Image (spheres, grey):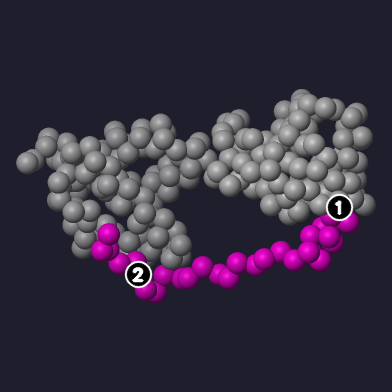
Amino acid sequence: KIRPESTLSVEEFAERSWLPWARENCKPSTVAEYETLWKTYLAPYLREIRLRDFRTVDAANLFALIHRNHKIGRTTLQHCKSRLSGIFTLARNQGALDTPNPIQGAAIPKKAAAPAPTHTTTLEEVLAILEFLRKDGEWKAHAAVALMFFAGLRPGEARGIRWEHFDGKRLYVRQSIWHTFTTDPKTLDAASPVPIIETLNEILNHLRERDGSPSTGPILRGPSGKPL
């Protein structure tokens, strides 16, 4: 019932198995988030303890230690818990462990700060931003804000939208671009056609005229022709 892999430290298993699995199965932006969280908050504390020796109490103590040393809030600690749970879930799926996942019952320190309320941008605020950008001649930024607010696009989807995806009435979200990586949209719903209101239609048509009326290529394109 005991596999040799179970004698690896948690750090060794994560480096050898979990991170390669994430790179193969997750979007590049997600992998970057995982790697940063792992290297900053988790890996330094998991070099000594073996995979099969790790208990729920170890996880609870670890989260308390991370909170004490890094002063991070509840949201980041929850991310740490989720990533660590994913490591043990993978170990169970690969047969390295047959014991229950020790992270599931681990508690996050109650004194960790809760996230601040999320501010929802109002229409008035967005119109003020658009007016400022228009007067300043920042037409690409003007269109970027309009795409994300009026069409509900995520930043990567706004970077990935192309003129051939725009028919004057709808935007067809076909791709998302993060740094130099092009991937599918985040969800199936995100790939559905997005209706365009008249305000956004006017902004996009104005940008197209200023760019020389292109029929193809990124809507938010830089001097090199690549997405901004």
Which residue extends farthest left? Answer: 1
Label whose residue precedes the other's in the sequence (1 or 2):
2
Give the magenta range.
104-132
Mark 2 crowdedness (10 Å alpha carbons): few <14, some 14-19, many ≥20: some
Label 2 sits on a secondary structure element that is loop
Which residue in the structure is indicated by mark 1? 199
Residue 124 in magenta? Answer: yes
Q: Nearer the viewer, mark 1 or mark 2?
A: 1
Q: Please state the horizontal and vertical placement of residue 160, each as a whole percent of the image.
A: 67, 36
Taking the image as shown, residue 119 lies to the left or right of residue 54, namely right
Mark 1 crowdedness (10 Å alpha carbons): few <14, some 14-19, many ≥20: few
Q: Which quadrant of the view contains residue 20?
A: top left
Q: Please state the horizontal and vertical placement of residue 123, each as a whole percent of the image.
A: 78, 64
Taking the image as shown, residue 84 lies to the left or right of residue 169, namely left
Classify the position of the N terminus by image quarter.
top left
Residue 109: mark in rendering: 2
